[in-house]
Image (cartoon, rainbow, N blue to C red):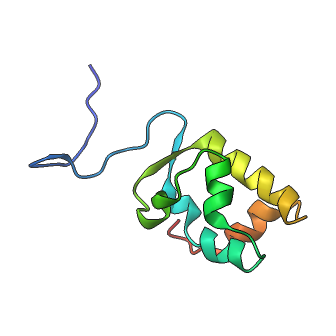
């Protein structure tokens, strides 16, 4: 039996790890502002790709990896920027 090292509090794990096929919402840090500067609506973009915009307020929540990929591909087309993901990543800090 393999035991994971998880730090528990009274109500359960303090650091829940993303499940298979999930990423931390921290990967979307700054997305709203980045989309807004390109005249995009982050809530609409995320919702179209199955991501609840409320995750932007909680970097430790989880989003589906495929939904994130779909969002970036959609943004590449929407903003006519084939390197959208790269340009977005350049705006983020190393902690993401």
State which quadrant residue 80 falls in. bottom right
Q: Position of residue 82 (x, y in %)?
A: 89, 60
Query: Which quadrant of the view contains residue 42?
Result: bottom right
Tell me: 85 left or right of 28. Answer: right
Residue 34 at what x, y percent from top left? 68, 75
Q: Residue at x 41, y 62 (%)?
A: 58
Find the residue positioned furthest to the bottom.
Answer: 37
Residue drawn at x 40%, y 57% as measured from the top left: 60
Q: Seen from this angle, which residue lies furthest left?
A: 10
Residue 29, by quadrant, is bottom right
Q: Nearer the viewer, residue 89 or 40?
A: 40
> At x 63% / y 77%, what residue is drawn?
33
Residue occupying image coordinates x 57% and y 62%: 28
- Give the total of numbered labels: 0
* Above/below status of 54 relative to 15: below
Image quarter of the N terminus: top left
Side of 83 relative to 7 (left or right): right
Q: Residue furthest top?
A: 1
Q: 82 or 75: nearer the eye?
A: 75
Expressed as whole percent of the image width and height from the top left, the position of residue 71 reads 70, 52
């Amino acid at each position: 039996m393999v035991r994971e090292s998880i730090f528990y509090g009274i109500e359960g794990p303090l650091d829940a790890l993303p499940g298979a096929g999930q990423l931390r919402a921290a990967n979307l840090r700054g997305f709203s502002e980045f989309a807004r500067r390109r005249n995009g609506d982050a809530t609409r973009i995320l919702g179209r790709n199955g991501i609840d915009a409320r995750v932007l307020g909680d970097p430790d929540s989880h989003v589906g990896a495929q939904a994130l990929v779909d969002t970036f591909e959609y943004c590449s087309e929407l903003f006519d920027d084939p390197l959208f993901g790269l340009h977005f990543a350049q705006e983020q800090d190393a902690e993401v």
